[in-house]
Image (cartoon, grey):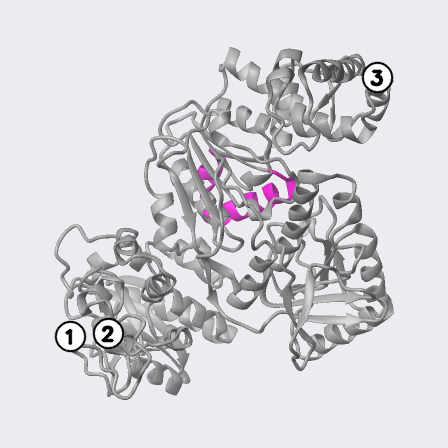
Amino acid sequence: MKAPKMAMSADFLAAYAKLPSQQQRAVRTMISRFDHASHGAGLNYERIANAKDANMRSLRIDGAYRAIVLKPDKGDVHMLLWADKHDDAYDWATRHVCSINEETGALQVYQPQRDAPQDSTPPSEPASPGVDQPGLFEALKHRELVRLGVPADMVGEVFDVRTEQALEDLAPRLPDEAYDSLYLFMAGDAYEDIVLEREAPSAPVDPTDFAAALDRDDSRARFVVIKDDLELEEMFNAPLERWRVFLHPSQRRLVERHWNGPVRVLGGAGTGKTVVAMHRARWLAQRLKPGERILFTTFTRNLAADIRNNLRAICSPDEMDRIEVTNLDRWVHSFLRGRRFRFRLSFDRDRNAWREALATKPSDLTFSDAFYSDEWEQVVQANGITTRDEYLRIRRTGRRTRLNRATRGSIWRVFEEYRAQLAERGVMELADCYRAAAALQAEDRSGANFTSVIVDEAQDMIAPAWRLIRSIAPQGEDDLFIVGDAHQRIYSRHRVVLGQCGIEIRGRARKLRLNYRTTEETRRWAAGLLEARHIDDLDGGADDNNRIRSAASGPEPHLEHFADRDGQASWLIRYLTELQDQGEPLRGVCIVARTLEERDAIAEDLQDADLPVEVLETDSPDETSKGVRVATMHRVKGLEFDRMMIASVNDGLVPHPAVVYSVDGAERAAAETSERSLLYVAATRAKRELVVLCWGAPSELVAKRGQSQHGRYLEPQPP
C-alpha cells in the first residue's frame, strides 16, 4: 500500500515546540507509524464532530494529547495542522478551516466567524447599518478581495472593517497573505500593484487539488512537504526557527530564480534580508557545476561567523563546500598574501607614517590636521584615488570646505608623502588592499572560480570594496546578490553609488517590507529616530521604511530614568532577579551601552550581584551560556534577543561627542545620522520588549511621553 504524502504547517511546528518533551517524542512516533499506515492500530484516526471543515481529522499522540490533520477527499496528501491537549486540540479544529483560495490557489488556514456560512455569496454592497464611518475596503469588489488573499467566507467581515484597529483585531483569524495585502491597501498601495506582487496561478484553480496548492509560493510560506525522516528530524530539532523552512512569497521570489545581472535588496531591520541571502546561496550552490563556488561576504567577522553557522543549518555538507563565507577584509588579506604580497594591514591610520606626511603640509595653507585626516579618509580613500590628476577632478560631495585646483595640488603632496611612507614601512590600508586586489583580478583571473558573490550588510562597504566585488564574479547571470539597509549604516558614513562602481542594478532593485523580528510598537519607535533624515538607497537615490510593518505587536518601548549610575544598576539587578524567579532564561536578555567603559561597568555591577553574565567581545561568538548578554551597541549588529535594555542613554554619551562634534557642516549631519542609526540598530534587536535606561540628564535622542506602570513611554525627538 502506498504511503500517504505528508505535509506540515508552520503552526504545527509552533504547537509542537510548546509540547512537553514526552509528548514531542510521542509525536515523532505517531508520524512514523502514520507514514506506514494511516489507519494503524492505536492512532485513533477519527473525524471531528461539529468541525467547520469536514476534512478535519484527529490522530492520537498519547492518552491526553491529539494532533489535528487535514485529509482532503481528493488525493493521498495529509496535512499536520495542530497539536495540543485533547479538548484544546478539538476546540482548535472546530474553529478553523483549511481550504484553497479560489483566485490565488494558495492553501490557507484561517478562522471565520462561528456563525459565518461556509459558502458565502458576494454581497450586493457592504453592510454598514447605523455606521457613519466608511469601510476601509468598500472600494473593492468581492472577487478583488479574494485575489488579495481573503478567503471567500471572510469577505463579509473584511467589508465591515472601518478602522486600522479593527483590521489588527481581525488579523489573527486571517491568512497571513490576506492581512499583508489589506495592510498595504490601507496604507495607500494601489490594488493593481499589490496583485502584481502576488503569484498568479498558471492555470484555473482546482479547489480540491491540495497537492497542487502545496507547490505554490503562498502555501510554501506556511507548509512544507516532508521528504524524508532526516528532514523531519531537522525541523523537530529546531521547531521555532521558521526561517530555515518557510519563506514569505516575496522572499522566495528573490531566491528561486535566475537574474540577468546584479540584484540589490533593501529592507529595514528584521525584514529577513540575511535569511534571503542565505537561502539564495543555498539555491545557487545546488546548481553549480563541478569546480564552481560562491563567495558570501559581509562587513564584520562576527556576522560572517553567524552566517556560516546558520548556513550549516540549511545546507548539506556538499553545498557548504561550495560556499566560502568570510568578511571582505579577511578575504582580501588572504587573496593578496596568496599572490605573494608581503605587508602589514592597517585598519586605521599608521601614526608614524601620518606624522611624517603632515610634516610636509604647505606653510601657506591653514587647514587643521583633522581636515587632512578627513580629506584622506572621505575623499581619497573612499573614492580609490591614487593620482594627483584623479584628486583634481573628483567631486568632493559633502565636504564643507571648497578647494580650488591650485589648493588641491598643494594638499595632494601630503597624501603622496603618506603613500610613500606606507610603502617604506610595508603597510597597506584596507582601501589600498581592495584596489590592489581588484587590479590583480583585472590582469589575471586564473584560479578565480567564484561564479557568484553574495553581499550582506552592503551599506557599510566603501567604493573600493565595491570595485573589488565587481571584479570577483564575472558579469552575467546571477553574478551579484546584494542586501543592505542604509538605516543601519554604523561603520561607515560614506554613501556609495553602485552604478559608479560598475554595478548596474536598474530593473533589479527590490525591497522587503515585512518585519519578522520586532514588534510594531518597537519598529515605529526605532523608525522615528531616523524620520526626516536623508537615507540613501545605495545607488544615488533615497530610501525610506514608511511602508514596512511588523507581523507581531507588543508593549510600547519605555524609559527608565534614574538620578545616578547606582540607580540604574539597582533597577537592572531587580529586573533580572525577577525574571530568574519567574523561570525565564536570562540568555534571552541583552543589555547594551554606547562605549566599552559603560559596558564593562554594567557587567561588573551585575557580576557583583551574583548574576550570570556573558560579555560579548568584539570578536567573540555568542556562546550558549545561561547568562544575560552585555555588549556594546556595535557588537549586537546581526543578533536578536527577547528583551533589549539600552543602558546609559545619557546626554554627553549618546550621541557620542567624539563622533559628532569633531566635524562640521554636512559631515556633522552625517555623523549625527550615524549615531541615530546605531541606536536604531540596538533597538531593533528586540523581539518582545525594549527598555531604554538613562541616568542624570537624558540623551537628546529620547523624550518622555505619557506614563506607564513601569516607566515612561518613549518618543524620539524630531531629527
The amino acid type found where label 2 is placed reads Val
Q: Is residue 173 above or below residue 455?
A: below
The amino acid type found where label 1 is placed reads Pro
Q: Which residues are magenta?
A: 299-322
Q: Please report the residue visible at 57 percent of the width from the left and 28 percent of the height from the top.
A: 463
Element type at mark 3: loop
Q: CA distance from mark 2 to mark 1?
A: 8 Å
Residue 650 inside the magenta-drawn segment: no
Instruction: State the residue in front, 520 or 380.
Output: 380
Q: Is residue 11 left or right of residue 610?
A: left
Q: Please report the residue visible at 43 percent of the width from the left and 45 percent of the height from the top.
A: 279
Magenta part, dominant SS: helix
Q: Position of residue 570 (x, y in %)?
A: 82, 73
Quarter of the figure with the N terminus: bottom left
Q: Which residue position is annotated with label 3?
A: 364
Q: CA distance from mark 1 to mark 3?
A: 83 Å
* Count of numbered marks: 3
Q: Residues within 10 Å of mark 2 (few under 14, many from 20)?
A: many
Q: CA distance from mark 2 to mark 3?
A: 77 Å
Q: Are marks 2 and 1 in contact (CB under 8 Å)?
A: yes
Q: Position of residue 290 (x, y in %)?
A: 39, 26
Q: Are marks 1 and 3 in contact (CB under 8 Å)?
A: no
Q: Earlier in the sequence, mark 2 or mark 1?
A: 1
The amino acid type found where label 3 is placed reads Asp
Q: Which residue position is annotated with label 2?
A: 155
Residue 409 in view here: yes
Q: Is residue 136 above or below residue 670?
A: below
Q: Which residue position is annotated with label 1?
A: 122
- Picture quadrant where residue 178 is located: bottom left
